[in-house]
Image (cartoon, coloured by chain):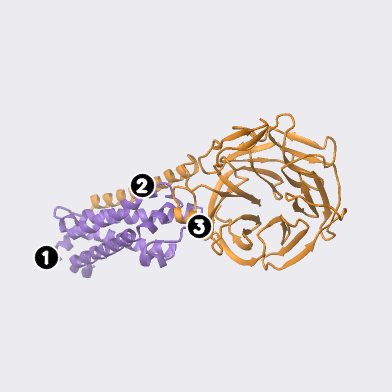
Chain colours: A orange, B purple
């Protein structure tokens, strides 16, 4: 009897230890060594509603409480106000103080309540107007060229521009006070050419007042405060730490071009609340290739804990993949060509 | 008590039979839906990175134990193994429910319909069954003398 009980107890304890050991080992592997596995909780994104926008050139320009504004790359003065979660739409025609003005194709609209901005970094042109008045006017210094700009204050923008000195990509801040433009070259870290290799998506988190830059071609993102002081650099979960692109210089010796198809790591990003959402291009070891082919995988990072949280899939809609997405609180808006699909996202897994 | 002792061999047989059914069923559903099982294990929050070899070892262990339960000589050992395996499953569920960031939503076959809490109860019942089996079987062995073994001997046939 004694030996029986002893054997039973040791079986019991050993079994528990084995499972606990496996758990600890697996967790360490997933979290630390970036052997690249995804945590995929069940049903984190649930489709709420979908609508047809009729054009595939819409993008999310910004949000205001329970409203999302969609702008259009081919018609920058045409704005659509979409309410959440009913997806009721209101069409808005923006006006400019110079009615004859022609817009370049890269003109972007950004909404940062109480203002909206019209931005074009090639001309360059910057205009601002009040929401509900909808007339854009010049409002500050706008001599700087940039490839993208993200407004974060009433008269301050993060810009992504070519530095005159180094001829390389640099992040900076443009404001209406002297010296107007301040580039902060140390934010981006050059790996190859300094232009393509540092390309990425610039985002502004309104809740944390942080700028997040997600590199397209390597597994990194950078978080800075509103003065572009780096707060932390973190890795996305995949293992591509070095940029895998080739660049070439053509003819005049000045123009740089991509010489190989780029090896994209992170396709797109969005940020809201404490989280960074990254659309990844790489399959993890614990995923089915079929899943990966049709669905869009979003990796979620906790910006406060500076750690990977979990991942989830956005299923195809009408046989299309997600072309752009945006997160506002618990809602995720995904654009599938001309269709807009609203999901509710649960962050309670973190 | 007398009832239990009288029908002891039958009870042990029934327990063994239940375990054989459970394990063969569980192993078969896992192997038949191998691909599904592989993905599920891979996406299990606590076994993410070690799912690949567990895919084989879990159903294999289940089948081996089921086989051992058929052979009378190996029954006791098999019951210990079954008890250990059920303990592992239970510990796994317990860890998932307490420590894991999220709870995965699937198991095999009918058990798929069960919630995780029900699963915990189900497993505990099987652990108790294995325990009963072990205690009943090991009593039968000669040379084991315990305080209350005297009256038991009287009814032993």
| Label of residue B157 in the image | 1
Is any part of residue B121 visible from this angle? yes
For mark 2, name the chain.
A
Frontmost residue, A81 versus A104: A104
Discs 2, 3: same chain: yes
| Label of residue A287 in the image | none
Element class at badge 1: loop
Q: Position of residue A209 (x, y in %)?
A: 72, 46
Location of the C terminus of chain B (image quadrant):
bottom left
Q: Which residue is mark 2?
A: A18
Q: Position of residue B52 (x, y in %)?
A: 37, 49
Category of crowding for the residue at label 1, using alpha-carbon neighbours closer than 10 angstroms: few (below 14), some (14–19), many (at least 20): few
Left or right relative to A336: residue A143: right
Location of the N terminus of chain B (image quadrant):
bottom left
**Label 2 – label 1 distance at C-alpha:** 40 Å
Left or right relative to B84: residue A341: right
Tell me which residue sits at (39%, 45%) in the image. A21
Category of crowding for the residue at label 3, using alpha-carbon neighbours closer than 10 angstroms: few (below 14), some (14–19), many (at least 20): some
Tell me which residue sits at (71%, 42%) in the image. A147
Q: Answer above or below: position of B24 versus A14.
A: below
Left or right relative to A298: residue B36: left
Tell me which residue sits at (24%, 52%) in the image. A4
Q: Which residue is mark 3?
A: A294
Is any part of residue A276 visible from this angle? no
Q: Position of residue B9 (x, y in %)?
A: 18, 65
Element class at badge 3: helix
Residue B124, located in which quarter of the rendered image? bottom left
For mark 3, name the chain.
A
Q: Answer above or below: position of A167 versus A132.
A: above
Element class at badge 2: helix
């Amino acid at each position: 009897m004694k030996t029986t009980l002893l054997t039973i107890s040791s079986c019991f304890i050993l079994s528990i230890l084995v499972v606990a050991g496996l758990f600890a080992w697996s967790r360490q592997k997933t979290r630390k060594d970036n052997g690249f596995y995804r945590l995929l909780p069940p049903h984190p994104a649930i489709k709420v509603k979908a609508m047809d926008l009729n054009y595939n050139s819409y993008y999310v320009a910004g949000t205001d409480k329970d409203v999302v504004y969609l702008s259009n790359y081919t018609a920058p003065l045409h704005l659509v106000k979409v309410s959440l979660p009913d997806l009721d739409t209101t069409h808005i025609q923006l006006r400019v103080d110079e009615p004859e003005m022609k817009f370049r194709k890269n003109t972007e609209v950004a909404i940062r309540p109480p203002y909206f901005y019209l931005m074009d970094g090639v001309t360059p042109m910057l205009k601002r107007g009040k929401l509900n008045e909808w007339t854009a006017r010049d409002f500050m210094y706008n001599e700087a060229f940039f490839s993208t700009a993200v407004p974060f204050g009433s008269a301050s923008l993060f810009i992504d521009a070519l530095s005159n000195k180094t001829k390389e990509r640099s992040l900076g801040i443009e404001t209406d006070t002297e010296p107007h433009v301040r580039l902060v070259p140390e934010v981006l870290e050059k790996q190859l050419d300094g232009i393509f290799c540092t390309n990425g998506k610039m985002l502004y988190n309104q809740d944390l007042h942080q700028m997040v830059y997600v590199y397209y071609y390597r597994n990194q993102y950078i978080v800075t405060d509103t003065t572009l002081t780096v707060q932390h650099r973190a890795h996305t979960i995949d293992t591509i730490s070095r940029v895998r692109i080739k660049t070439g210089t053509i003819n005049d010796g000045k123009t740089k071009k991509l010489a190989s198809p780029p090896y994209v790591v992170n396709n797109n990003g969005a940020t809201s609340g404490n989280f960074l959402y990254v659309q990844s291009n790489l399959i993890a070891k614990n995923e089915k290739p079929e899943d990966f082919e049709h669905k869009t995988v979003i990796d979620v990072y906790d910006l406060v804990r500076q750690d990977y949280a979990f991942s989830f899939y956005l299923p195809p809609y009408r046989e299309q993949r997600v072309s752009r997405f945006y997160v506002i609180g618990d809602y995720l808006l995904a654009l599938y060509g001309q269709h807009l699909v609203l999901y509710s996202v649960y962050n309670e897994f973190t | 008590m007398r009832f239990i002792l009288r029908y002891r061999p039958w009870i042990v047989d029934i327990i063994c039979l239940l375990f054989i059914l459970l394990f063969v069923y569980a192993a078969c559903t896992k192997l038949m839906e191998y691909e599904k099982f592989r993905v599920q294990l891979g996406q299990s929050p606590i076994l993410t990175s070690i799912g690949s070899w567990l895919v084989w070892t879990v159903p294999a262990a289940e089948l081996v134990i089921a086989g051992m339960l058929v052979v009378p000589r190996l029954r006791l050992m098999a019951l210990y193994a079954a008890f250990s395996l059920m303990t592992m499953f239970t510990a796994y569920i317990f860890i998932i429910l307490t420590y894991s960031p999220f709870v995965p939503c699937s198991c095999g076959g009918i058990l798929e319909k069960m919630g995780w809490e029900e699963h915990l109860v189900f497993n505990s019942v099987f652990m108790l069954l294995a325990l009963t089996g072990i205690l009943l079987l090991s009593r039968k062995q000669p040379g084991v003398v315990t305080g209350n073994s005297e009256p038991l001997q009287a009814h032993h046939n």
